[in-house]
Image (spheres, rainbow, N blue to C red):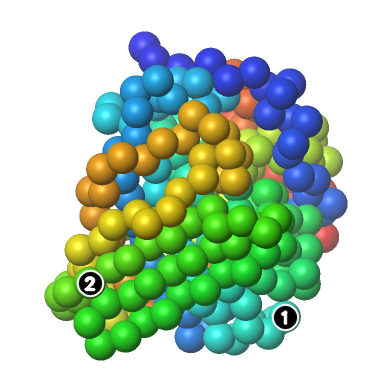
Amino acid sequence: MLIGTADVNFLGERAPRIVSFASEALLLSDVACLQLTAEMRNSAREAVLPPALHPTIPPVVSIQVWDVADSPVGAFGFALCRVSCRSGVRARGFTTAAVTSSEAAAQILTQRFGFPCSVGQVTLRRHYDGADAEVMADGRRILGIAALDPEPMGLDDVQYTGNLNLAHTPMGLRLAQVEVDHVASRVERLTARLTAFDGAGWGNRLLDPYFVVSASVALETVSVQPIRFVCKPDELAFAGTEPVAAAEQS
């Protein structure tokens, strides 16, 4: 059975802190979400995941870029990089890094939901024949996506798996299970390519997506749900999953 081999203490040094678990969902309206999945090198398969998680075969990187027009903190851009994995039998994505264009959004997403956010420039442009995305962080371009030839899809044809965010929590260092509900009004399939990807900028130099598998863009409403379960990063999910007690929510 394959499990992650990343050093938990090393990962924990860079993990954000959840000050208090969110008690209500974070509602984001009028969102455009570009999702791209790509195969990555086998050398990173176990090495980028903590021992609680099982890598997928083939190993896959999932990238999302959001353009949020309306939220409790106003408009903002958001991008995250995840490694496809399983927690027990559940398909998940282990978040390696995230970037947002808003200090206020970064504070909520980090302190309530454990997304490892830095503040940078996140741009998503949709046009009649495709979409383009770019992320700048620390003065360098860490992501570029060029996508063309949109084709309409069914509203339920795109799957968004749950997130696992490693964070220091009131319960200790944990993998926070963050479910994000996407309710789409329009979904399109795209033919995409990566024009830039900086693995170190997304949390690990071993990240090396080399073959784009799929891409889509959706117009939707997004709600980030309160965390109900966390998992110890050095124990398999069957033994290490814990419920978040109501008394610890705020």
Q: Is residue 131 above or below residue 196?
A: below
The picture places residue 172, in percent across and down from the top left corner, at: 79, 32
Q: Which residue is labeled 2 in the image?
A: 148
Picture quadrant where residue 249 is located: bottom right
Q: In this view, does 150 lie above or below 242?
A: below
Picture quadrant where residue 243 is located: top right
Residue beneath the point at 22% across and 72% down = 148
Q: Is residue 111 above or below residue 210?
A: below
Q: Could you say which is closer to the camera, residue 23 or residue 33?
A: 33
Q: Which residue is labeled 1 in the image?
A: 73
The picture places residue 170, in percent across and down from the top left corner, at: 83, 41
Q: In this view, does 242 lie to the left or right of 21?
A: left
Q: Is residue 18 left or right of residue 69?
A: right
Please tell me whether mark 2 or mark 1 is closer to you in this view.
Answer: 2
Toward the top, the furthest residue is 1
Residue beneath the point at 36% across and 82% down = 126
Q: Earlier in the sequence, mark 2 or mark 1?
A: 1
Q: What secondary structure is marked by label 1?
A: loop
Residue beneath the point at 76% across and 45% down = 16
Q: Is residue 114 left or right of residue 35?
A: right
The picture places residue 53, in percent across and down from the top left corner, at: 49, 26
Q: What secondary structure is marked by label 2?
A: strand
Picture quadrant where residue 177 is located: top right
Quadrant (top left, top right, bottom left, bottom right) of the N terminus: top left
